[in-house]
Amino acid sequence: MAKHRAERTLQRLESHLQNHDWLALERPTIADCAVCPYVLPTPEGGMDLEPWPAILAWMPRIKELPACCAPG
């Protein structure tokens, strides 16, 4: 059940990021910082992100932001 929910959520995120570089505006916002802690560790949970290339393209952009998604 959790994997199905994650896949549904990732698909929605993928659909948005296919047409936008960021989640809310045409620049990074708190929305990106709020979502990244849930998405970045996805591979550690055993989910392959290869089916979601727009998410894979977003991840390096979000990691470059200062203090956003920085480890604890």
Image (spheres, rainbow, N blue to C red):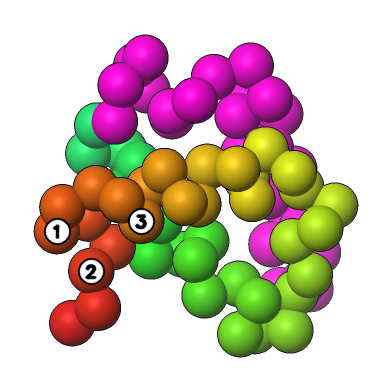
Do tag 1 and tag 2 residues touch (Cβ < 8 Å)? yes
Q: CA distance from mark 1 to mark 2?
A: 5 Å
Residue pictured at 47% horizontal, 51% vertical: 60
Query: Dot 1, crowdedness within 10 Å: few (<14), some or many (≥20)?
Result: few
Mark positioned earlier in the residue sequence (3 or 2): 3
Q: CA distance from mark 3 to mark 2?
A: 8 Å
- Residue 52 is left or right of residue 65, and the answer is right
Measuring from the top left, give residue 65's x and y in whole percent: 24, 48
- Residue 55 is left or right of residue 59, and the answer is right
Q: Give the position of the C terminus as an image quadrant.
A: bottom left
Measuring from the top left, give residue 19's x and y in whole percent: 63, 16
Please state which of residues 4 and 60 is positioned toward the viewer in this rendering.
60
Residue pictured at 43% horizontal, 29% vertical: 23
Measuring from the top left, give residue 64's x and y in whole percent: 31, 51
In the rendered image, is residue 72 in sight?
A: yes
Residue 47's place in the image compared with 22, above or below, is: below
In the rendered image, is residue 35 in sight?
A: no
Residue labelled with disc 1: 67
Query: Dot 3, crowdedness within 10 Å: few (<14), some or many (≥20)?
Result: some
User: The residue under label 2 is which amino acid type?
Assistant: Ala
| Quarter location, residue 20 | top right
Residue 26's place in the image compared with 34, above or below, is: above
Residue labelled with disc 3: 63
Residue extent of the magenta highlight: 1-28
User: The residue under label 1 is which amino acid type?
Assistant: Ala
Q: CA distance from mark 3 to mark 1?
A: 9 Å
Residue labelled with disc 2: 70
Residue lying farthest to the left in this orientation: 67
Residue 54's place in the image compared with 9, above or below, is: above
Residue pictured at 64% horizontal, 50% vertical: 56
